[in-house]
Amino acid sequence: MELNIHAPLDKEVVKKLKIGDMVYITGTIYTARDAAHKRMAEILAKGGELPIDIKDNIIYYMGPSPAREGRPIGSAGPTTASRMDKYTPDLLDLGLGGMIGKGKRSAEVKEAIVRNSSVYFAAIGGAGALLSKAIVQSEVVAYDDLGTEAIRRLEVKDFPAIVVIDSEGNDLYNKSQS
């Protein structure tokens, strides 16, 4: 099924998403990769507040290449999501609505997705130039010193992704094994 959805996510919409659904996301999403996740975990461990409001928001595991003239961002393909797995359950428990990346997730992440009625989307690896066309605005909002791994706020229009783990814990990567 193909669906147009809005970010930040509505929990009722998330609950209706099923593995294999093709979605086109419009709205605000954030980027964060390994180094940004590590910093956020350190802040939380000290009782601090995150630099972004993650409630119902989507984090895209992506570090863009430099923007070409006239474009808000360069190539914007997904990175391997499992590198963020040790940080993800805590963020989901704080209200993170969804994630976009590529590759499988750990059992702990799947449990946190179900516990929090969240969702994991996959974007097509190797299609960063194509995916960047759905990004209409990009702004660094935290950790500028991390360069491509800084947290960015992206405005997206019809950003294509596939539901890989739905709010019930169904996993498209393991579908043939169940």
Image: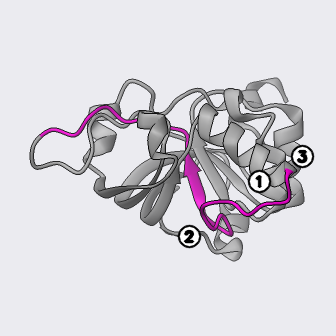
Name the amino acid, label 3.
Glu
Percent position (x, y) of residue 82? Answer: 70, 28
Question: Alpha carbon of mark 1 to alpha carbon of mark 2: how far?
Answer: 15 Å
Few, some or many residues within 10 Å of mark 3 (<14, 14–19, 20+): some
Sequence order check: which comes first, mark 1 or mark 2?
2
Span shown in magenta = 46-68
Position above or below: 111 against 141:
above
Is residue 161 part of the magenta span, yes or no? no
Instruction: Determine if residue 177 is in view.
Output: yes
Secondary structure of residue under mark 1: helix
Q: Which mark is residue 101?
A: none
Q: Which mark is residue 91?
A: 1
Q: What residue appears at the point 69 percent right and 53 percent down from the top-left corner?
A: 119
Percent position (x, y) of residue 72? Answer: 23, 51
Percent position (x, y) of residue 55? Answer: 68, 69
Q: Which residue is mark 3?
A: 111
Few, some or many residues within 10 Å of mark 1 (<14, 14–19, 20+): some
Q: Are marks 3 and 2 in contact (CB under 8 Å)?
A: no
Secondary structure of residue under mark 2: loop
Q: Quadrant of residue 26?
A: bottom left
Position above or below: 155 against 91:
below
Q: What residue appears at the point 83 percent right and 47 percent down from the top-left corner?
A: 89
